């Protein structure tokens, strides 16, 4: 067999091995990102033009998060924010729209104190999704409902849902181990009616 044929075969083998190695690395990357981001991975893929674009965005979030100095809250700060939340929750019964706006502002304050940049909502959500992928969608839903209310398009029911969504993220942000993502949606434990919101405040 001519030498050039062997050369072509050798090149083909090298190319094949390179392709297989690239595919293995790609699968490993996908598996790692899917495990890290959970439901946020599926959301990113669903809203992007391709899986590769979604994974590049998630990887970029991780890189940005590594450059941030995220710190836990002090015990005093935790207690202060929990007290503030109870005030906001109690306010909901008489003035739902104001309470939801206050909840949105309170969460932004918690994030800022923990070290998350708060320049705009989309960036806040992207940053917090790295540490709290299980509940970041609650934050987005709560923000959308709060904005609708501010625009005059919110109902009491939608405002109640906004409070529940906000509470899911709030609980994680103020917990001592808040840097560790939880494995379930905390909103399942939240009060489901206006009356329960008020009763939960009285019990606290």
Image: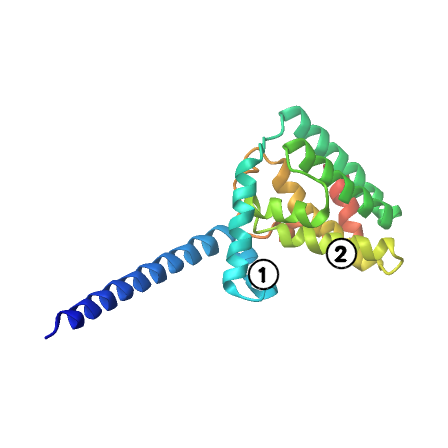
Q: Which residue is mark 1?
A: 43
194 w.r.t. 80: above or below? below
Mark 2 and mark 1 in contact? Answer it, CB < 8 Å: no
Q: Is 70 positioned to the left or the right of 121 in the image?
A: left
Which residue does the image show at 74% across and 52% down from the upper left?
Answer: 143
> Which of these two is toward me, 53 or 14?
14
> Which of these two is toward me, 5 or 16?
5
Q: Residues within 10 Å of mark 2 (few under 14, many from 20)?
A: some
102 w.r.t. 25: above or below? above
- Element assignment for label 2: helix
**Where does the N terminus fall, quadrant-wise?**
bottom left
Residue 202, quarter of the rendered image: top right
Q: Position of residue 60 (x, y in %)?
A: 54, 48
Which residue does the image show at 86% across and 61% down from the upper left?
Answer: 153
Number of disc labels: 2
Which mark is drawn over residue 144? 2
**Where does the C terminus fall, quadrant-wise?**
top right
Which residue does the image show at 80% across and 40% down from the upper left?
Answer: 88
Residue 83, quarter of the rendered image: top right
Distance, label 2 to label 1, CA atoms, is: 16 Å
Q: Position of residue 101 (x, y in %)?
A: 82, 46
Going from N to C along the chain, the mark reached first, 2 or 1, is 1
Residue 112, quarter of the rendered image: top right
Q: Position of residue 12 (x, y in %)?
A: 25, 68
């Amino acid at each position: 067999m001519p030498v050039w044929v062997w050369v072509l075969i050798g090149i083909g083998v090298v190319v094949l091995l390179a392709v297989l190695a690239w595919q293995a690395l790609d699968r490993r990357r996908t598996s790692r990102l899917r495990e890290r981001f959970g439901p946020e991975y599926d959301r990113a893929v669903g809203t992007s033009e391709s899986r590769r674009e979604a994974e590049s965005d998630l990887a970029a979030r991780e890189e940005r998060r590594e450059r941030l100095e995220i710190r836990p809250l002090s015990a005093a700060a935790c207690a202060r924010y929990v007290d503030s939340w109870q005030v906001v929750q109690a306010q909901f019964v008489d003035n739902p729209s104001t309470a939801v706006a206050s909840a949105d502002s309170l969460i932004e304050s918690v994030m800022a104190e923990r070290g998350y940049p708060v320049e705009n909502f989309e960036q806040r959500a992207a940053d917090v999704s790295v540490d709290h992928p299980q509940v970041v969608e609650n934050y987005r839903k709560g923000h959308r409902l709060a904005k609708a209310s501010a625009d005059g398009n919110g109902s009491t029911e939608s405002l109640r849902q906004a409070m529940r969504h906000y509470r899911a993220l709030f609980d994680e942000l103020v917990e001592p181990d808040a840097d560790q993502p939880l494995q379930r949606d905390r909103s399942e434990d939240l009060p489901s009616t206006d009356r329960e919101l008020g009763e939960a405040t009285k019990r606290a």
